[in-house]
Structures are given as structure tokens and as C-alpha cells.
Image: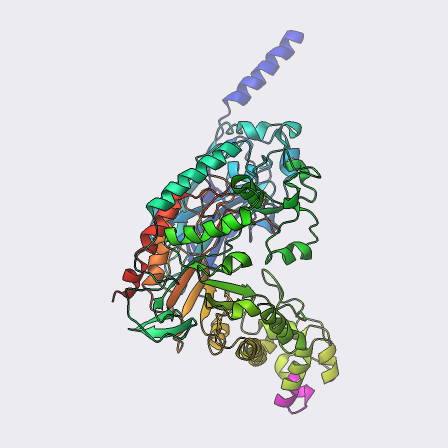
């Protein structure tokens, strides 16, 4: 009997082993009603899906909703094809939870995926390997406040935690990387297959136990378990890097056709006013510098030694050899980036450490701030740059060597629910709005008189929403908001005091105007067409306030706008009536298709752009990825060249001067985007691209 049982067991094992696991043809094996488009019209053609976005959108998504047990599968294979004449970015995500598919995160649990960039009309086969389950998920669970983690860096887009047996959703989310154009031809995904086989073995570092892995950041703020070109291993190497850079700066002393402001000394002489201004010359908008020379702003954001401040709260075990009380490095628990400090405070972050300043101290000694500042001006000149852009160190700006632009932010009575990446929209009728700007201008009295001050931005990446969004948000705020009283006054006048007439149009049932004032609920969609009118008044009031304060308290200082990110044409059109220039933060590969709303012809300045890569340093490649630092230099050159060739664009500002902290700043950003790394060593491949376009920029700009 025992032998019989053993024989049956052996037979069962043999039969199980012989059972072949077939490749899953996803489109063929999924009911068509389970393949869904979002902001898109899809056409299933055999083993492919053609995706055409609708509603003139730059975004589109296709989702396959089907249970897949990926236990015995090793990879997902598919072909992507860009049918557009502009680049696209595709986020690919495999997950068991529906809540993740609309906005995939880099720390999405029980998921895997990646990001793919496709050039115009590019067709590419993609293979995403599926790793084995994590040996120590407690390590992955300990990562927090980082956009990308060491595990996400190993596995692609998502911080994979091992459970793919219950996969329910496969989604492709596409963004058109264009400015003024929307999708026309769409994109295609085909031959989507799940390939059987043994899972890919996790890298050695991912197999490390908790006590072996932590701490994972060295005394310089770098990731311990990888090496790369230019990584710092000792203070001696910091000094060696300093000598290498001195030789580079001596070899590249800067363009020879510039005046002290970086203006075009070899170009035409215009009227000198002692301040920066705008002028349209030979069909193109230009800055004109204080000496009357044509000037184009080629700059970089956050020129400061404090670029890599990182939170310590609940994360001290990440870091090795941290300074003790009484140490000369104890001071870097308290240094900070002045503009960003309020964001740490708002998030109740109590403890931080400034790795970038600490490394500058190691490199330059006790006078590191002064030496870093002097060096920053030499670097900018050598690299072909002429602007210290916003959020930079005030002492560096005031050295009267390089023109600079600053940014202030209105901090007043908030419109609750107005959202935004940074602060909520402020009530422009509240007295605190204007007073906030006045106070900040008064605090900059020295800068306002400085001829090296180019101008000021006010605010950053506000949420403007749809053309009724701000008014609809005001309408559901409480009665303490002055903007809501203005809304009541406006519609009371429009409907001649008849609340029933308003109810009839809006589809509401307010018993009185006081009931509307007390309302805190979302208004029906029928109200939106009417709300657009008051929404326009909010936007006018916002920009008019800024303009009036500038005219009174900072006459002659350029008001450079609000640094639009996502916006609508109405906000841009109204803003253009008050600002000296329009400003946008444009994360794209090119600006060649940038157009202003009809009827507007204003100078435009790019407040932020960048490209990043995963081949060195921080885990996160940034908002726009390229394959290497060499490619980053090429992408930089192409982007700035496209701006120089555009008649309205008067400058580009890279974000940012140095890499962010490996373990993230207040919001988790840990981008590899610096001209220098966390140890203040330049990325020379990127610098080469900056020089190629920077040294020749006035010749490029002046061509017909």
C-alpha cells in the first residue's frame, strides 16, 4: 500500500510537471467589454488596440480588467506604437487594485510597471520582467517620503512588493508631450502577452535583510549599495574633484560677446534705462538689459548650497555616521532653503539634515557659503548661463555679478478646496492678499533698487481648473470668505434680486440669498455656464491686485506672472492684460509648437524645465526621463534652441542647480536633475550641452 501511494504521488508530480503553462494572449483571452478606454475611443483590431483620445485631450488610457494569476509567469511583452508627430509618454501598470489605475504612483503596492518615452512615429517592443516575491518586504515597507525608492529603481516605475497572483488590472496611460497640440492620430498597443517561465531573481541588494540593509545612505547623502561615475567615496576625492573643475573653468572662461549683465555686447545698442525691460526688436521679443543691450534669460533655479535638505522624522535609521551634538557638522541640522522652509513647516516636519551644504563644508571649509557663491557666478559664466533664477540664495544674488529673478508667494485668506500643488488659491478681495505682497516687497527693498534684479514672479503653479472652477469653489466656501460675498452681490445684481430666477437657471432650490451664502455643497452643472462670468472676475481681481501693488511699491520692476503649469486659455488671456510677461513651467522635449491664445502677443519666460536619468545618483529620473547624462546634454541643447528660435520666448530656467536629496525633500521629490550632484561635482556631459547652446545663443536668437 505504501509503495502504491508513493507511485500515485510520483505520477501526480509527473503529470503536474508535464502540464504546460501557456502564453496568455491578453487581448484574445479577455472579453471585449473588459477592455476599456478612458478619455479615449478604442478600436480592438485582432491582437492590438488602437487608442484615439477624445475631447481634445493630451491624455488617454486603456485598461484591461481581467483576473490574471501570474504565479508561473516571468515577463509581460507588448509593442507600443506612437502614431503622433509629437513624443508621447506611456505609464504601464499591472496591479490588483482599481484605485491605482487612474493615477499610478511610484510606491503603488502589489504592482509593477514602468514609464516609456516614444519619439514621433516610433514603434517599440517592450519586455517587462516580473521579479520573484520579496524576501524581506519589511525593508520595502520602511521606505517613506520618497518619490522613488531603491526598490522602485530596481524594478522600474513601481516599488514592487511581490503579490501579483491577484492581478486584476493592466493599464496603459498615455500623455502627449506637446504644448499647444492635442492628440490627433493616437497610439497603439499590440501583441500583449504574459510569458510563462521562472521569475527573474531579485538583485542582491533587494535580498538583503532589514538589519543588513539599513542604514542605506552614506555620510555624503549617497546611496551605499551602488557605484557610479563621479561618486564620492572620501573627502580626498572631493578635493580632487575641485581641482578637476578648476582646470575645466580655466579652459572655458565664458562667451566673449557679452557685457557684465550677460547681454549681447556685439549686438545693437538700444536705449539704456538702468533697469531691465522688454522690447520687441526685429520681430522678436527680448529683454533689454540696463545698458541697453538685447538680453535673453538663460538661467537655472535654486542656486544654493542647500539643495539637498531631507527630512529625518521617523527616518533616522536610513543614515549612517550622522553628526552628534557638539560636532562641527551639527550646524547642518539647522541650515535650510529659505523659500522651501515654509513647506516643511506646513507639513509639521521637525528635523532635517542638509547634505549638500555639509558636503560643501567638507569641500571648501568654514567659508563654504562665500566660496560656493563666488564659484556659482564663475560656473554660470563658464557654462554659458546669465541668470540666477528664482528660489536661489539671496546672498549669492546680491553679489552684483549675475542678473537674478526672485519669486514671492501670496499667503492670505485661502479659498478652501481650491487645491493646487503648493498653496490653495487666495481670496483676492481679502485685504490680506495685497498686504502679503506689500510686506514681501518691502522686505526686498535692497533688491528692488538693484540693477541686477530682472523681475519677480508672484506665485507658482496655481490651480486654475476649468473656466468655472474657482467660482464654483467660492460658492461652497463658508460665509467668512469675502469672495463669496462678492459672488452673492454679483448674481444678486444680475438676477435683480430674484433668487427664484437664479434657481431656475442653476437647477437649485435656495430659499433666499442668505441660503446661497450659507451653502457648502457642490453646485449643479447647470450653474457652470453662469459661474464662468464670476470666475473671470476672480482672475481679473487676482492679477489686478498684483499689478497695482507692483506699480506702487516696485515701480520699474518687471512683473513676470504666476508660472502657469496646467491652466486654461481664459486665465492666460486675462493674466496677459496685467503681467509684463507670461510665465509657464513647461516639462516637454521642445517648445517649437508653443502658441499663445488668440489676440495675445507677449514675451514668455519658461520658469522650469528639466531632464533626468537613472544612471547615477538619486533614484528618481525626474519628470522627463532620458537614457544618460550624454542624452541629457543633447536634450537640453535641443530644448533651449527651440526656445531661442521662438519669437515670443525670452528665456528658459532649468530646475534645478544641484540634485535633490537622495531620500527626498518635504514632498518626497528626489530627482536626478542637477547640473551638479549632491557633492557639488558637475555632470560634465550635461554641461557640454549647456555650453553648446549657451555660447551661441545670441547668434541663434538673432537669425531670421
Most distant residue in the front direction = 367
Q: Position of residue 74 (x, y in %)?
A: 49, 32
256 or 703: nearer the viewer: 256
Q: Position of residue 230 (x, y in %)?
A: 45, 36
Q: Is residue 471 magenta?
A: no
Q: Position of residue 489 (x, y in %)?
A: 66, 86
| Residue sitting at x 67%, y 36% | 317
Whether residue 589 sits left or right of residue 233 in the image: it is left
Whether residue 132 sits left or right of residue 351 in the image: it is left
Q: Is residue 494 magenta?
A: yes
Coloring applied to the structure: rainbow
Question: Quadrant location of the N terminus?
Answer: top right
Whether residue 548 appears in this view of the structure is yes
691 or 284: nearer the viewer: 691
What segment carries the magenta color?
A: 492-503
Most distant residue in the left direction = 704
Whether residue 75 sits left or right of residue 492 in the image: it is left
Number of numbered discs overlaid on the protein picture: 0
Q: Position of residue 532 (x, y in %)?
A: 56, 78
Above or below, 608 relative to 524 = above
| Residue sitting at x 28%, y 73% | 282
| Residue sitting at x 35%, y 49% | 689
Most distant residue in the bottom direction = 496
Whether residue 479 sits left or right of residue 465 in the image: it is right
Whether residue 592 appears in this view of the structure is no
* Among the 4 quarters of the image, the one containing residue 505: bottom right
Question: Quadrant location of the C terminus?
Answer: bottom left
Main SS of residues in magenta:
helix
400 or 135: nearer the viewer: 400
Amino acid at each position: 500500500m505504501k509503495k502504491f501511494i508513493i507511485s500515485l504521488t510520483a505520477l501526480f508530480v509527473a503529470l503536474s510537471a508535464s502540464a504546460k503553462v501557456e502564453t496568455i494572449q491578453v487581448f484574445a483571452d479577455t472579453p471585449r467589454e473588459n477592455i476599456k478606454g478612458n478619455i479615449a475611443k478604442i478600436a480592438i483590431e485582432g491582437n492590438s488596440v488602437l487608442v484615439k483620445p477624445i475631447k481634445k485631450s493630451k491624455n488617454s488610457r486603456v485598461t484591461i480588467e481581467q483576473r490574471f494569476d501570474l504565479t508561473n509567469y516571468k515577463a509581460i511583452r507588448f509593442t507600443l506604437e506612437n502614431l503622433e508627430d509629437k513624443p508621447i509618454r506611456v505609464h504601464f501598470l499591472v496591479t490588483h487594485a482599481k484605485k491605482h489605475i487612474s493615477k499610478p504612483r511610484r510606491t503603488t503596492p502589489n504592482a509593477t510597471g514602468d514609464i516609456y518615452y516614444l519619439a514621433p512615429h516610433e514603434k517599440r517592443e517592450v519586455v517587462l520582467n516580473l521579479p520573484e516575491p520579496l524576501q524581506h518586504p519589511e525593508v520595502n515597507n520602511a521606505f517613506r517620503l520618497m518619490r522613488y525608492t531603491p526598490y522602485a529603481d530596481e524594478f522600474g516605475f513601481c516599488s514592487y512588493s511581490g503579490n501579483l497572483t491577484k492581478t486584476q488590472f493592466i493599464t496603459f496611460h498615455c500623455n502627449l508631450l506637446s504644448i499647444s497640440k492635442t492628440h490627433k492620430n493616437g497610439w497603439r498597443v499590440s501583441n500583449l502577452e504574459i510569458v510563462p517561465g521562472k521569475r527573474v531573481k531579485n538583485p542582491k541588494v533587494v535580498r538583503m535583510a532589514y538589519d543588513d540593509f539599513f542604514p542605506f545612505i552614506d555620510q555624503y547623502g549617497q546611496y551605499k549599495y551602488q557605484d557610479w561615475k563621479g561618486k564620492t567615496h572620501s573627502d580626498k576625492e572631493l578635493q580632487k574633484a575641485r581641482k578637476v573643475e578648476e582646470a575645466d573653468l580655466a579652459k572655458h572662461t565664458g562667451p566673449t560677446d557679452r557685457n557684465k549683465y550677460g547681454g549681447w555686447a556685439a549686438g545693437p545698442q538700444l536705449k539704456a534705462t538702468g533697469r531691465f525691460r522688454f522690447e520687441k526688436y526685429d520681430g522678436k521679443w527680448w529683454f533689454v538689459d540696463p545698458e541697453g543691450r538685447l538680453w535673453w534669460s538663460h538661467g537655472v533655479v535654486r542656486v544654493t548650497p542647500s539643495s539637498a535638505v531631507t527630512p529625518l522624522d521617523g527616518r533616522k535609521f536610513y543614515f549612517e555616521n550622522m553628526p552628534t551634538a557638539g560636532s562641527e557638522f551639527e550646524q547642518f541640522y539647522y541650515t535650510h532653503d529659505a523659500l522651501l522652509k515654509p513647506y516643511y513647516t506646513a507639513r509639521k516636519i521637525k528635523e532635517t539634515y542638509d547634505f549638500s551644504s555639509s558636503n560643501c563644508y567638507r569641500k571648501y571649509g568654514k567659508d563654504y557659503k562665500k566660496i560656493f557663491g563666488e564659484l556659482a557666478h564663475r560656473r554660470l559664466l563658464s557654462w554659458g548661463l546669465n541668470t540666477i533664477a528664482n528660489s536661489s540664495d539671496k546672498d549669492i544674488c546680491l553679489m552684483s555679478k549675475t542678473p537674478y529673478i526672485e519669486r514671492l508667494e501670496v499667503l492670505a485668506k485661502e479659498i478652501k478646496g481650491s487645491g493646487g500643488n503648493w498653496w490653495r488659491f487666495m481670496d483676492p478681495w481679502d485685504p490680506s492678499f495685497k498686504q502679503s505682497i506689500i510686506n514681501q516687497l518691502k522686505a526686498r527693498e535692497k533688491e528692488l533698487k538693484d540693477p541686477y534684479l530682472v523681475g519677480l514672479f508672484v506665485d507658482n503653479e496655481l490651480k486654475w481648473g476649468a473656466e468655472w472652477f474657482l467660482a464654483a469653489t467660492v460658492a461652497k466656501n463658508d460665509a467668512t470668505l469675502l469672495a463669496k460675498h462678492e459672488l452673492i452681490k454679483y448674481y444678486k445684481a444680475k438676477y435683480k434680486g430674484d433668487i427664484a430666477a437664479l434657481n431656475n437657471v442653476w437647477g437649485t432650490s435656495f430659499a433666499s440669498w442668505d441660503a446661497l451664502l450659507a451653502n457648502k455643497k457642490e453646485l449643479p452643472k447647470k450653474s457652470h455656464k453662469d459661474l464662468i462670468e464670476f470666475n473671470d472676475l476672480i482672475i481679473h481681481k487676482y492679477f489686478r491686485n498684483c499689478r497695482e501693488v507692483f506699480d506702487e511699491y516696485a515701480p520699474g520692476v518687471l512683473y513676470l506672472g504666476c508660472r502657469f503649469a496646467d491652466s486654461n486659455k481664459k486665465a492666460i488671456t486675462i493674466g496677459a492684460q496685467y503681467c509684463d510677461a507670461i510665465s509657464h513651467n513647461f516639462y516637454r522635449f521642445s517648445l517649437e509648437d508653443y502658441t499663445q491664445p488668440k489676440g495675445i502677443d507677449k514675451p514668455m519666460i519658461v520658469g522650469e524645465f528639466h531632464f533626468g536619468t537613472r544612471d547615477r545618483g538619486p533614484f528618481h529620473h525626474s519628470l522627463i526621463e532620458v537614457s544618460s547624462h550624454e542624452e541629457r546634454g543633447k536634450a537640453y541643447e535641443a530644448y533651449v534652441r527651440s526656445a531661442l528660435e521662438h519669437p515670443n520666448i525670452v528665456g528658459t530656467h532649468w530646475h534645478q542647480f544641484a540634485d535633490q536629496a537622495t531620500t527626498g525633500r518635504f514632498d518626497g521629490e528626489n530627482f536626478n536633475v542637477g547640473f551638479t550632484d549632491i557633492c557639488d561635482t558637475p555632470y560634465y556631459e550635461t554641461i557640454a550641452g549647456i555650453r553648446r547652446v549657451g555660447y551661441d545663443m545670441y547668434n541663434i536668437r538673432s537669425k531670421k
